[in-house]
Image: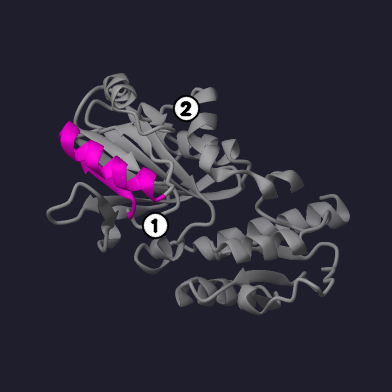
């Protein structure tokens, strides 16, 4: 009897995510157990059985805390180790840079100082620049600023709101790729196309834009980024410049994997579950 999958969800998780995970479980005789973060009792001690699988598609702070409360040694997860559960994802750009992974020139702004800001703009290559506020989804919080006056006014607002923005080089003439990594391989990749009247891009609705990729510099970078954040599953965003250079933007865990499955027909949920099952076997019988 295969171990159950405990899935930490909340009201923000798309129905498609849980439906695909539940279907992948049903196809393999795995019991799917949803855990609602909004109803979780932190005073109740819950001990999951050894070898059980644990995954959190929810991104809320409450869901993160529920997952941390449920975690124990002997559970199969997408974390490289138990301490990775407490990794600070906001520090990822610094980690990528330390590992030599190619990222757009990036500076985290800590002070609302005009002289410092001018130096930072020069350091990332000059205007236009991208300002990113970590934590958003779907491009929310990513802004293109083309003049110093507009940049300064936006940063005034962000610092007044207590945010810590990142200043990044703007990479023009590039294709935005999302690569989905499971374990040590890329199981899906697809292009994101620019929105009308916007520099940001979104997932394609054309199945022809989706593929199960073969090993390449693009997939190698995606796998390296996933390892850097100590995960075994991630949606990695990469810019492929017209010159052939690659720029790593971020590695997202969790990520919205149903896009590749519903549009591209790639069984990402199945690959995810197979990886967790393999981890469970390794933990329980040493395979």
For image coordinates 59% across by 59% down, the residue present is 272
Q: Position of residue 180 (x, y in %)?
A: 47, 51
| Residue bearing mark 2 | 101
Between 106 and 57, the one nearer to me in the picture? 106
Determine the secondary structure under disc 1.
loop
Please say if 125 is above or below 229. above
For the residues labelled 1 and 2, say whether their Cβ atoms are less than 8 Å apart: no
Looking at the image, residue 154 lies above or below residue 29? above
Task: Please determine whether, in this image, residue 209 is positioned above or below residue 88.
Answer: below
Horizontal side of 206 relative to 236 (left or right) equals: left
Asked if residue 1 is positioned above or below residue 163 in the image, the reply reads below
- Which of discs 1 and 2 lies nearer the camera? The answer is 1
The single residue placed furthest to the left in the displayed view is 197
Residue 205 screen position, x and y as percent? 26, 63
Compare residues 235 and 11 and report the one nearer the observer: 11
The structure residue drawn at horizontal position 54% and vertical position 52%, both measured from the top left corner, is 253
Place of residue 198 in the rendered image (x, y in percent of width and height, measured from the top left):
17, 51
Residue drawn at x 36%, y 34% is 112
Which mark is first along the chain, 2 or 1? 2
Question: Which region of the structure is painted magenta?
Answer: 140-161
Label 2 neighbourhood size at 10 Å, few (<14), some (14-19), many (20+)? some
Alpha-carbon span between mark 1 and mark 2: 23 Å
Label number found at residue 195: none
Rendering colour mode: one colour
| The quarter of the displayed image where residue 196 is located | bottom left
Q: Which residue is mark 1?
A: 137
Crowd rating for badge 1 (residues with CA inside 10 Å; few <14, some 14–19, many 20+)? few
Q: Determine the residue positioned at 22% across, 31% down.
A: 242
* Residue 232 image position (x, y, % from top left): 61, 47
Residue 276: in magenta span:
no
């Amino acid at each position: 009897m295969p171990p159950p999958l405990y899935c930490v969800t909340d009201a923000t998780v798309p129905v498609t995510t849980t439906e695909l995970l539940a279907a992948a479980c049903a196809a393999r005789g795995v019991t799917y157990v949803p855990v609602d973060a909004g109803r979780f009792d932190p005073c109740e001690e819950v001990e999951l059985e050894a070898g059980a699988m644990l995954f959190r598609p929810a991104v809320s702070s409450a869901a993160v805390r529920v997952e941390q409360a449920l975690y124990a040694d002997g559970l199969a997860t997408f974390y490289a180790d138990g301490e990775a559960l407490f990794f600070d994802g906001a520090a990822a750009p610094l980690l990528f840079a330390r590992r030599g992974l190619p990222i757009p020139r990036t500076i985290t702004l800590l002070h609302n100082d005009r002289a410092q800001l001018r130096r930072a703009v020069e350091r990332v290559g000059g205007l236009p620049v991208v300002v990113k506020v970590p934590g958003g989804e779907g491009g929310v919080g990513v802004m293109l600023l083309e003049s110093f006056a507009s940049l300064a006014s936006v940063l005034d607002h962000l610092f007044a709101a207590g945010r810590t923005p990142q200043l990044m080089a703007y990479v023009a003439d590039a294709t935005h790729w999302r690569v989905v990594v499971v374990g040590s391989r890329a199981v899906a990749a697809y292009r994101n196309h620019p929105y009308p009247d916007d520099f940001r891009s979104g997932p394609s609705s054309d199945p022809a834009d989706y593929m199960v990729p073969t090993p390449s510099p693009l997939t190698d970078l995606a796998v390296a980024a996933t390892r850097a954040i100590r995960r075994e599953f991630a949606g990695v965003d990469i810019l492929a410049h017209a010159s052939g250079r690659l720029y790593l933007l971020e590695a997202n865990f969790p990520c919205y994997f149903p896009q590749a499955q519903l549009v591209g027909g790639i069984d990402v949920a199945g690959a995810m579950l197979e990886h967790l099952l393999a981890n469970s076997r390794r933990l329980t019988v040493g395979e």
